[in-house]
Image: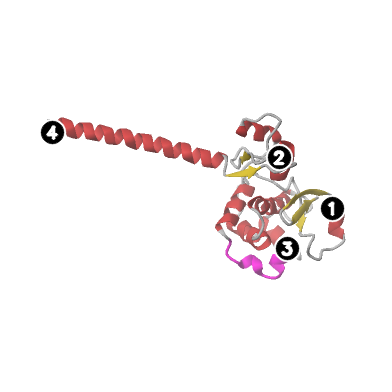
């Protein structure tokens, strides 16, 4: 009797271990497919939100099970998994990019910016790496003379926050809220007239992004 009782306990223990494991996997997958949410404000449309966060409109609708309309205060899941990508450029891992180096630049240039703005700064850097107009390595882009104020003044050597590291990973995995931009700047700070000649693609936080 004692042996049978012990065997039953072991079976129950294995069963609940299995249930917990499945639960953890489901939670993990859920967190990966929608790492953050956006709360709709007055004047928002799904199209505007799509452009702002750099996620295709069809993807937003699919993830949230939405039609064409949203209401004020509605929470929209923003997918930040590997299937993301901005219009015109497929998302995907950029193998070999130094995450920590990119995170330091993001932290130095966008520490006080919202998370989506941090990812956008990282995306701009990576867009430059892929553009024939700039050096074709991350280090080459970062240390191009006078390209980034934080490199010139040495702030780039500050240890990045966990959010900046996460933002770097998201940018490396293909999320581009900047909409393919090659430049960003804060219009509240003194900037050259030339930068205003760039075509503005998006505005996130205090930064303007353009080509």
Query: Can you tell which mark lies on residue 45?
Result: none
Residue at horizontal 65%, vertical 68%? 155
Q: How far across and down, in percent of the image, does residue 172 sit?
A: 63, 48
Marked residue nearer the N-terminal end (3 or 1): 3
Label 2: few (<14), some or many (≥20) within 10 Å?
many
161, above or below 16, in the image: below
Q: Please name whichever residue, 146 or 188, is drawn nearer the observer in this view of the structure.
A: 188
1, above or below 28, in the image: above
According to the picture, the residue beneath numbered tag 2 turns out to be: 50
According to the picture, the residue beneath numbered tag 3 turns out to be: 148
Marked residue nearer the N-terminal end (3 or 2): 2
Q: Look at the numbered disc 3 and give the secondary structure of its residue.
A: loop
According to the picture, the residue beneath numbered tag 1 turns out to be: 198
Tell me the mark number nearer the camera, choosing from 4 and 1: 4
Residue at horizontal 67%, vertical 57%? 113
Residue 107 is inside the magenta segment = no
Quarter of the rendering containing residue 41: top right
Tell me the mark number nearer the camera, choosing from 2 and 1: 2
Residue 159 is inside the magenta segment = yes
Question: Are the residues tagged 4 and 3 within 8 Å (C-beta)?
Answer: no
Q: Look at the numbered disc 1 and give the secondary structure of its residue.
A: loop
**What is the span of residues highlighted in magenta in the rendered image?**
149-160
Label 3: few (<14), some or many (≥20) within 10 Å?
some
According to the picture, the residue beneath numbered tag 4 turns out to be: 2
Q: Please name whichever residue, 40 or 30, is drawn nearer the observer in this view of the structure.
A: 40
State how far apart marks 2 and 4 are (Cα).
62 Å
Residue at horizontal 18%, vertical 35%? 6
Marked residue nearer the N-terminal end (2 or 1): 2
State how far apart marks 4 and 3 are (Cα).
72 Å
Question: Are the residues tagged 3 and 2 within 8 Å (C-beta)?
Answer: no
């Amino acid at each position: 009797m004692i042996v049978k009782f012990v065997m039953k306990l072991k079976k129950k223990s294995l069963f609940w271990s299995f249930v917990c494991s499945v639960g953890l996997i489901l939670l993990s997958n859920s967190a990966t497919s929608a790492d953050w949410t956006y709360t709709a404000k007055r004047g928002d449309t799904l199209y505007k939100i799509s452009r702002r966060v750099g996620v295709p409109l069809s993807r937003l609708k699919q993830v949230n099970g939405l039609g064409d309309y949203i209401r004020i205060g509605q929470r929209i899941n923003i997918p930040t998994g590997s299937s993301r990508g901005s219009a015109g450029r497929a998302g995907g891992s950029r193998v070999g990019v130094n995450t920590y180096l990119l995170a330091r630049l993001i932290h130095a240039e966008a520490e006080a910016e919202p998370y989506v703005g941090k990812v956008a700064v990282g995306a701009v850097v990576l867009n430059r790496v892929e553009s024939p107009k700039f050096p074709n390595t991350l280090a080459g882009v970062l240390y191009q003379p006078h390209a980034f104020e934080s490199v010139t003044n040495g702030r780039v050597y500050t240890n990045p926050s966990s959010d900046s590291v996460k933002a770097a990973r998201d940018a490396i995995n293909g999320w581009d809220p900047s909409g393919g931009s090659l430049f960003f700047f804060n219009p509240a700070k003194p900037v050259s007239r030339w930068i205003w000649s760039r075509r503005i693609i998006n505005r996130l936080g205090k930064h303007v992004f353009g080509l």
